[in-house]
């Protein structure tokens, strides 16, 4: 019982930091300004880890690996801890399980990225109905725009209602089924 509680707490902490690190990574990829509440929160939460890593780990093709690599490593630690608690992996017999754990961490990081996208799409939809001029509307819109533009080119608005966020969420859910 204590092992399950410990694993739960580890999942919560690694999940929070993984979301924050991935949000920082995607905000930089899509050139979203950090001069807002979400950006300030993400920077304050992750700077202690990302700033020192940037000195040792430079970016690659404009991607901030100092934000992406820790998110992946957190998922790797979580996968190892879960496998260890279930009795599947001991440190001395890690060899055969290592490729599986590495792949599991890649899939978990991709899943977190898709959950982040779905959350951003839901926040954008709610803000567009409730408070379209909110300070959070612009950064959320910048995060989701690359995913919504292709859908908006194919699916027209119906009665001044944009269905592209709904379609994007359905497509993201389909991708999650395959991961």
Image: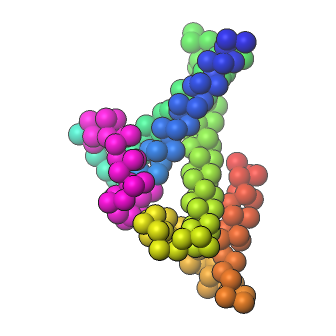
Instruction: Judge whether 31 appears above or below 73 on screen.
Output: below
**Image position of 29 (left or right of 163):** left
Residue under the image location 71 percent in, 70 percent down: 166
Q: Position of residue 107 (x, y in %)?
A: 62, 43
The one nearer the camera, 160 or 67, is 160
Residue under the image location 66 percent in, 80 percent down: 162
**Image position of 164 (left or right of 24):** right
Task: Locate residue 125: give its quadrant.
Answer: bottom right
Q: Position of residue 168 (x, y in %)?
A: 67, 68
**Image position of 83 (left or right of 131):** right
Quadrant placement of the N terminus: top right
Q: What is the residue that sits farthest to the left in this orientation?
A: 55
Q: Main secondary structure of the magenta part?
A: helix
Q: Is residue 45 visible?
A: yes
Task: Locate residue 122: give its quadrant.
Answer: bottom right
Q: Is residue 65 magenta?
A: no
The one nearer the camera, 131 or 162, is 131
Instruction: Judge whether 70 appears above or below 174 on screen.
Output: above
How many numbered circles are shown? 0
Q: Position of residue 95 (x, y in %)?
A: 58, 20
Magenta span of residues: 25-54
**Image position of 29 (left or right of 107):** left
The one nearer the camera, 104 or 44, is 44
Instruction: Judge whether 65 appears above or below 31 on screen.
Output: above
Q: Position of residue 46 (x, y in %)?
A: 37, 40
The one nearer the camera, 131 or 109, is 131
Q: Is residue 26 magenta?
A: yes
Residue under the image location 60 percent in, 30 percent down: 11
Query: What colouring style does the render use?
Result: rainbow
Residue under the image location 54 percent in, 71 percent down: 131
Q: Is residue 103 visible?
A: no
Task: Locate residue 104: give its quadrant.
Answer: top right
């Amino acid at each position: 019982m204590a092992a399950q509680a410990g694993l739960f707490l580890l999942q919560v902490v690694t999940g929070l930091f993984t979301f924050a690190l991935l949000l920082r990574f995607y905000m930089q990829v899509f050139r979203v300004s950090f001069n807002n509440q979400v950006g300030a929160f993400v920077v304050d939460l992750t700077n202690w880890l990302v700033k020192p890593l940037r000195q040792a780990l430079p970016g690659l093709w404009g991607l901030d690996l100092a934000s992406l690599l820790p998110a992946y490593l957190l998922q790797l630690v979580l996968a190892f801890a879960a496998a260890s608690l279930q009795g599947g992996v001991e440190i001395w017999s890690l060899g055969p399980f290592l490729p599986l754990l590495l792949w599991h961490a890649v899939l978990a990081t991709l899943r977190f990225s898709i959950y982040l996208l779905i959350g951003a799409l839901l926040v954008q939809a709610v803000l567009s109905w409730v408070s379209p001029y909110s300070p959070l509307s612009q950064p959320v819109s910048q995060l989701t725009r690359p995913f919504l533009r292709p859908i908006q080119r194919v699916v027209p608005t119906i009665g001044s209602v944009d269905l592209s966020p709904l379609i994007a969420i359905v497509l993201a859910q389909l991708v999650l089924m395959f991961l």
